[in-house]
Image (cartoon, grey):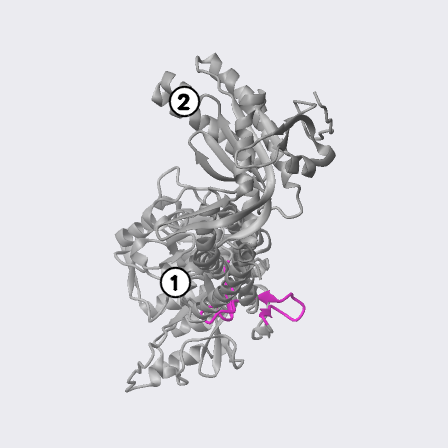
Amino acid sequence: MAYLDRTRKNFVRGAVLTGLSTALLVLALNYFDVLNWLEDDAYDTRMSLSAKPNTGDPDIVILDVDNASFDVFKERFGRWPPTRLVWSETLKYLSRGKPRAVVFDIMFGGQDSDFEIRNGDSTVKLTGEEIDAKFAQSMQNAGNVVISFTVNKRAPGEYYVVKNPAPILAKWSLLDADSVPAVPGRGTAWGNEEHPLNYPLNTPWEPLAKAAAGLGSASADLDDDGKIRHVPLEFVVGSQAYDSLFMRTVRLLNHQEDSTRWAAHGFRLNRDSPVVPLGTKDKQKDSLLLRWHGNRNAGNCAQGDCEKGNFAYLRIPYWNILCSIQRSLCNEGVETFPPDFFRNKIVIIGASATGSYENHPTPLGDKVPGFLEHATAIDNLLHNDVIRPAPGWLQPVLVIVMSAAGVLILIFVRSTSADVLLMLAAIALYVSISYTLFVHWNFWLPTAAPLVTLVLSYFSCGAIRFATTGRELRRTRGTLDRYISPQLVGYVLNHLEEINLAGEKRELTIFFSDVRNFTTITEQSDPIELIALLNEYLTAMTEIIFKHDGIVDKFIGDGILAYWGAFTPGKNHALLAARASLEMTRRLEELNREWQSVGRQPISIGIGLNTGDVIFGNVGSGKKIEFTVIGDAVNLASRLEGLNKQFGTSIIISESTRSRLGDAAAVRALGGVQVKDKTVDTQVYECKCRNSTAPQRLVQKVSAD
């Protein structure tokens, strides 16, 4: 097997094993939820970039107890929450406009306090029981009110000692009408304890709970980082399931009183409705993944930084509603809303004020009021506009594919800059696909694990390449580039084991060149100028030798020793050497014109070409070893170069070289000459060119002239 092929095979084997290990590592990290935070951040980024204001359902209206309204309540009623007479009067006012539903994201636990109503000079005192009765009657008359309750999760291993279970059981009994038998394995469990006594429960006061059209849980189910990205449809305690506030509202709007219709990967609102997809991860299992609307930070109204138009839904400060009910409470210029404004609306009443403690972090902001969670969930369900998670099998497939992509980039792309650009392009393409699917099809394509896999696979395989082919190629190429043209490097690397570097006899064409009268030029020239001229000359000549697949053996002062045929099997090395020699003479003419234009002295050269058997390989021992060619053919090439002075020529070739050229060269016979160390005359020829501009095809012309 070729040297380069063997090295590359080792790299490919190592890269494949590394890619497989990377995929297994990422899958293990993902299994233990190590990458959840990164995936959540990617989800939040897509959500915040794609969320737009004024895209929510216009029929959803929020009555917001913001900071200003909260301060009014504290000033006028001396407390928060205010007397329930406020809610009762609000409900009466709204009911005149016939909204579709009124949802209270406010707790009404326990009986209300007594309250005095001033009417001119007289004062009417109402007991808490009377106030609750008025509120309950208003709810009964409206017939479309959903109010909230909360249940707190039990911490693992935490139990409650209940001395008197009767009050707690009475609270649970209030929820019986809105509970259904739990479907095994479905719904979001509050905990593992079967008995409900182990859960802190905050339910509405009994008259209010019985008067409402429905009860729903407003308990927040936060992700590990404390954000709200999903909302459970129902919570399970023991053997019973209880609707979330938004789910109970949607069921009321659809006149659906039966339990959730679970499907394989979601649920149906009713028998004929499409399947609504739900989350599949443990934390988000059987939960609705919210499609948030509105600009980022538009929900942070508790700090007074809201701007009109940034909201997904119309939010009316509660103080404006009180002013609408009783105009004498407010100054002129305060916007009011007639009851008919709320016709066919879904009205959600909640609080964003700082003191209400109802704000939670979401992908759109750090302090988003809880009522936006319910409004968004209702909107998503009514319009089937929810985030659709990828099936569980897709993420492992993507991890494997991206790991393979990182491996393949390193295997098939040899250029470092090109493989980096390709890897970055792959990341950009995947991110674009992920974002497009999210924005236009609400499809949550896993992003973190696949991209982490691609990056890890790429860099780990890059380390393998650096340790195998990269190291060997850099070391070998660094040596070869000094001797061999770039186009020959690949051949040499692939045939290193076939090349006998210790010494081998082979027929080569030897090239020898020398600058005429260089000693005289040296004496007449400035040393710095001379070195610059010589470097420019040698660089130009070397490039031409490399261009024609030659090998530069060494520089001997101003002379060049090169040869052809060592690593180009199947090619006419004599012809390659002749073409290179002719091009060198033309290039020297160009250089001379350039040098003369700047006041430099022109130079001329002589070239000798001889084809014959030589020994080439490593010569020397110890600390001094040189790869070179030796033999009589080398000496003859040197002698031929020197004959150019005698004949006034530039290129002289031997009889053996001329015979290898065949009909591809234009030559002039110079006759036989007595060469030093030769006992018989050597026939020599001048190598000429019929077309000095493009000697691609030379026609033989033997002349005795």
Q: Which residues are magenta?
A: 265-290
Q: Is residue 548 visible?
A: no
| Residue 149, position as x, y percentages in the image | 40, 70
Please, which residue is most extreme toward the front here? Answer: 679
Give the CA distance from mark 2 to mark 1: 104 Å
Residue 57 on image: x %, y %: 55, 52
Earlier sequence position, callout 2 versus callout 1 = 1
Q: Is residue 141 left or right of residue 440?
A: left
The x, y position of residue 110, in whole percent, is 33, 71
Q: Position of residue 542 (x, y in %)?
A: 51, 33
Read off the residue under disc 1.
106
The C terminus sits in image quarter: top right
Q: What label sits on residue 405 in the rendered view? A: none
Q: Residue at x 40, y 22 (%)?
A: 519
**Amino acid of disc 2:** Thr
Which residue is under mark 2?
Answer: 519
